[in-house]
Amino acid sequence: MSKIKIEEVRKDLEENGWELISNKYENLQSELSMKCPEGHNVYLPYGKWRKTHKCPICEKNPLIEIGHKIVPKNKNTVRILAIDDATRVSGWAIFDGEKLIQYGKIELTHASSIERINAMKLWVLNMVNMWNPDIVAIEDIQLQKFERNGGENSEGIMTFKILAQLQGVLLDFFYENGIKSEIVHVSVWRKFCDIKGKSRSDKKKSAQLKIKDWYDISVTQDEADAICIGRYVANKKQKTQILEWN
């Protein structure tokens, strides 16, 4: 068997989202400096790494896991399902009290808006059945201005109308099924989470950096928004409970 070259090791790591820091490779048992997809500096032999591709630091973080395992809800805990309202790509997060226990995103590829709205409603129904939340928090809609060739077009208005239709369908669904819901405006959760930035893209990036700082996880923009929404509602509910106890 021919000896493994460092270029092969580097390629293997990169294909799995890792980065090789070491510039010298001796054998499968020699320790290498590498960086995991979450940015943790790790020292592992290549032989051990290629068996599991696991970062020992990430393994200590219960949020970083493959798949979306359903976590049983504690009896005295308020479970929150937070959703970044959208009809194409939407982030979601589950909080038990103020503890983030799971997150993810859903992508809808249906051609028409009514198909995506219906698919989103069915997805929410499935999430409610699986996670049994005490409250579902969704982001409020707002009119976004889109410009093309220096002039305003109707894209922002159309998006606003579709999201308004989705919000109406979800609120009716929550009402019919006796599910407590809360609408959270983007300015409210951004202020609570101290999201900075002048442009929309700057604020999206700021939310992702906040999540990295709070939970040491790298998330998409949609997931970051959902987690921030959930964090705001969780904190609000916790304060309400404290006042009720007093």
Image (tube, grey):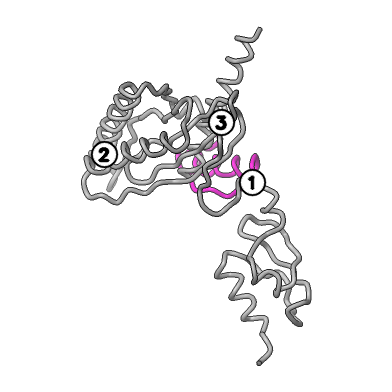
245 sits left or right of 137 in the view: right
Query: Quick one: SS at disc 1?
Result: loop
Q: Which residue is drawn at 55% across and 70% down?
A: 15
Kind of residue at disc 2: Asn
Q: What residue type is labelled 1?
A: Pro
On the image, which quarter does residue 14 sit in? bottom right
- Quick check: marks 2 and 1 in contact, CB under 8 Å? no
Amino acid type, mark 3: Arg
Q: Distance between the residues labelled 3 and 2?
A: 27 Å
Image quarter of the N terminus: bottom right
Q: 36 or 199: which is nearer to us?
A: 36
Q: Residue at left 61%, top 33%?
A: 99
**Mark number for residue 118?**
2
- Measure the C-alpha gap from mark 2 to mark 1: 33 Å
As measured in the structure, the alpha-carbon distance from the residue carrying label 1 to the one carrying label 3 is 17 Å
Is residue 49 placed above or below 217 in the rendered structure? below
For label 2, the crowd category at 10 Å Cα-Cα, with few meaning under 14, some 14 to 19 and many 20 or more, is some
Q: Which one is earlier in the sequence, the residue at label 3 or at label 2?
A: 2
Q: Is there a contact, CB below 8 Å, between mark 3 and mark 2?
A: no
**Residue furthest toward the right?**
30
| Residue 30 in the image: above or below residue 242 | below
Which residue is painted at 41% across and 23% down in the image? 181
Taking depth in this image into account, of 204 and 167 the one nearest to the observer is 167
- Disc 3 marks which residue? 231
Q: Position of residue 98 (x, y in %)?
A: 61, 29
Q: Helix, strand or loop at disc 2?
A: helix
The reply, left or right, for residue 20 in relation to residue 137 is: right
Q: Name the residue under label 1.
A: 62
> Which residue sits at x=44%, y=38%?
130
